[in-house]
Image: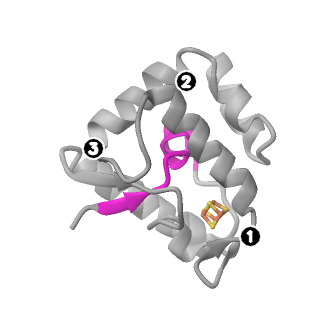
Amino acid sequence: MDKCLRPHHGMCFQFYEGKGYSKDFTDHMGRVIKEMENAPEQKITLTVSTDLVCSNCPNNEENKCNSFGQVKRYDEGVLQACGLEDGESISYENFIKVVKEKVIDTGVRKKICGDCGWNYICSKKEAN
Ligand code: SF4
């Protein structure tokens, strides 16, 4: 069975530098990214819902993000920009590539998630 990934986490993965909501969360997210990068051909299912990253997040309350409306908007923004759909299966490498091309390189990211608390990290890295 494919692993589930929220579409907006395809943006978070691009600039992740080990910061996050708790040590447990960052340890887990680091492991997830490494595992994905070690098997980039693996298929993932895009899901506008809690995913494998959310599983260790303190904002995950009874399997629902406590910022549900905001992150749903981010997810939908990524899907729309990339021409992808909720529930679609795609290889990790193709997903990361399309997010980079359609969301990061076009400068659309800030329109999608510019109000995120971690935006300062991504903005700084985009400028370099
Ligand atoms: S639960 Fe919410 S804040 Fe936590 S990783 Fe998932 S989407 Fe992000």
Asked if the residue at label 1 sits under 8 Å from ligand 1, the reply is yes
Residue 102's spot in the image, x, y percent?
48, 21
Find the distance from the CA under tag 2 to the CA under tag 1.
26 Å
Q: Residues within 10 Å of mark 2 (few under 14, many from 20)?
A: some
Residue 125's spot in the image, x, y percent?
64, 27
Mark 1: which amino acid?
Asn
Instruction: Say which mark, if any, is on residue 66.
Output: 1
Which mark is nearer the camera, 2 or 1?
1
Q: Earlier in the sequence, mark 2 or mark 1?
A: 1
**In contact (CB < 8 Å): disc 2 and disc 1:** no
Query: Residue at the spot x=53%, y=16% of the render?
Result: 105
User: What scheme was used to colour the molecule?
Assistant: one colour
Q: Is residue 20 above or below residue 60?
A: above
Find the distance from the CA under tag 1 to the CA under tag 3.
27 Å
Residue 9 on the magenta span = yes
Instruction: Say which mark, if any, is on residue 104.
Output: 2
Q: Which residues are magenta?
A: 3-17
Q: Earlier in the sequence, mark 3 or mark 2?
A: 3
Q: Secondary structure at mark 2?
A: helix
Residue 58's spot in the image, x, y percent?
68, 76
Q: Secondary structure at mark 1?
A: loop
Q: Would residue 40 be found to the left or right of residue 125 on screen?
A: left
Task: Name the residue that disc number 3 marks.
Answer: 90
Asked if the residue at label 2 sits under 8 Å from ligand 1, the reply is no
Query: Residue at the spot x=57%, y=64% of the render?
Result: 26
Which mark is nearer the camera, 3 or 2?
3
Mark 3: which amino acid?
Ile
Image quarter in which the C terminus is found: top right
Asked if the residue at label 3 sits under 8 Å from ligand 1, the reply is no
Q: Secondary structure at mark 3?
A: strand
Q: Residues within 10 Å of mark 3 (few under 14, many from 20)?
A: some
